Image (cartoon, rainbow, N blue to C red):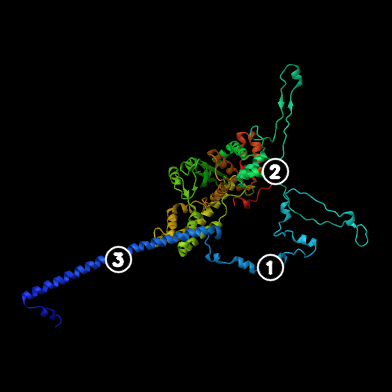
Amino acid sequence: MDDASPRTSLPDDIAELQRWLVAREHVIAVHQKTIAAHQTTITQHEATISTLTQQRDAYYLEKLRLEVRLAKALKPAYGPRADRLSDPGQLLLDFGGLLDALPMDADDRPIEPDEGTPRERTASRRLRTRGRRDIGQLDHLPLIEQIYELTDELCKCPTCQAAREKIGTAISYTIEYLPGSFVRVRHVQHKYACRQCEQNGHNPNIELATKTNGSPIDKGLPGPGLLAYVVTAKFADYLPLHRLQHIFARQGFELDRSTMCLWMADIARLVRPLYDRMVQRVKQSDVLATDDTEMPLLQPGKAQKARMWIYRGDDAHPYNVFAFTESRQRDGPAAFLKDFRGTLPADAYGGYDGIVLSQELPRAGCWAHARRKFVDNEKAAPEVARAILRRINRLFELEKRLPPLEPEGDAALEGASADAASRAAERRRRADERLRRRQAVPLLESLHALLVEQKAKLLPKHPLAEAIGYTLNQWRELTLFTRDPAVPIHNNLAEQQMKRIALLRKNALFAGSPRGGETAAILSSLTSTCRRHGIDPQRYLTQLLANLPDTPISRLDDWLPDQWQRTQRTPSVDRSLAES
């Protein structure tokens, strides 16, 4: 019945049925217009929602970028220097209140003016020694002995007035500093002639006694020690020349800094053959690490952004060579690396791409660069960043267990032939390669899967997505260390040398001319290589400048820092401080 009711409700009259159908069509048309209007409204709302979603994502990304910038700005003041995640709760600790709450040590309590005898008050003001160093470790320092004896009056016994006898001694040590001083060295060269030949009308054969320890600069005033001190002060201790000028003036030696600039240029010209020899040997390295930093070049109006490059040779060619260029264009490293055929650890600077492709060089990435990007952007997605950093840190922990590929110094090779040492080094390389393939490769595969998964979940312009994209784009370079045991996992040893240029730039501000930049590169190469081998640059440069003018080109290699160190008997600087 229900199925038949709609049909029976239709009118039987044909005209009435037609009017009913027209009315129904009108209602249907009205509903269709309403549906179309609603559909237009829905489309407009969807467009509005899409716009608002884009604005929300943009505001969210801007918020993340601001948080990352704020974290980077606060890190130098409050965060750790190393590339590790910091606990934000540390910034909320009241260190001042904690120090005030600590109990005061009675020995640290200040003594009032009227407390104790004058002798006790004087003794209380003496500096207390904390962590006294064993005096036996300072036997290499010159010793000045001072003997203290009682006067005749104090030798009398206060009881019986008899003279007291010496029964022993009490020995103690203090370390004193004697400031440097300038001395005048008068060189008197006697002339010799044959009187008999002169009387006979022949050539008297006049000869002048040879002068030693004169100035390396032709007809110059400074001796080797003074020149070595100026070079060491500026390029090893980063002391600008205008400060040296005031220091010298306090010691009674008036010297203009422009004169010292000329001295530096003359020294660089003198040691240039040695620098060129270091460049030749560095290019023979199997692994040559490189990096660069800005070195402003003085120009009219505004300083030019010139660059200083570092090329750090491997352990078989242990030299740190700097090169100065007036720009960061590819021409500079391309000219230096023209004859290089080894592996090039470097950052992701695009200028290396053409060099690597044209010379078919394998290029190694730097995991320290990749890790730093995740540390800097950790605030954007803490959980994801920490999961990635845990895997990267495990790679660094694995590298710490690897022994050095090359023996340190001659002591490791003592009693062993060169072939035996080469075979031992090769065995170590194979062992390191097996360890990396067994442990590092599975860890890298897990890390790669995590990076791909998280990149798909993040917005394209998300700060952490950019860090993930950098790592994935450099994945072939970053994993080269698993295929070549001689390649380090990071490029930190080369990057550390950029701190030397940064300190020089901070104090000296700029290079005065392209020639001044080349001078800085040559002298920084010598002082940096000395630091690498734990050599006192003052002592090395003094001997170098005193002997290099008379050294034949065939003996030039004897004055390379590592070769010179082997001939010295005195202990060098602690190697633990080298390249720190």
Q: Are marks 3 and 2 in contact (CB under 8 Å)?
A: no
Residue at image position (90%, 54%) is 152
Give the farthest residue toward the bottom.
1
Of 419 and 409, nearer the camera is 409
Answer whether residue 417 is visible to the viewer in this image: no
The quarter of the picture where the N terminus appears is: bottom left
What's the distance in space between the residues labelled 3 and 1, CA to CA? 70 Å
**Where residue 213 sits in the image (x, y, percent)?**
69, 36
Counting residues from the N terminus, which is met first, the one under dot 3 or under dot 2? 3
Residue that mark 2 sits on: 251
> Toward which corner of the image does residue 42 lie, by quadrant?
bottom left
In the rendered image, residue 67, in percent from the top left (x then y), is placed at: 47, 61
Q: What x and y, as percent, mark residue 164?
A: 90, 58
> Which disc number belongs to residue 104?
1
Q: Earlier in the sequence, mark 3 or mark 1?
A: 3
Left or right: residue 286 versus residue 237 is left
The residue type indicated by label 3 comes to His
Q: x and y percent of residue 230 in the render?
A: 64, 42
Q: Amino acid at mark 2?
A: Gln
Q: Find the distance from the CA under tag 1 to the CA under tag 2.
A: 44 Å
Image quadrant where residue 62 sits: bottom left
Q: Which residue is mark 3?
A: 45
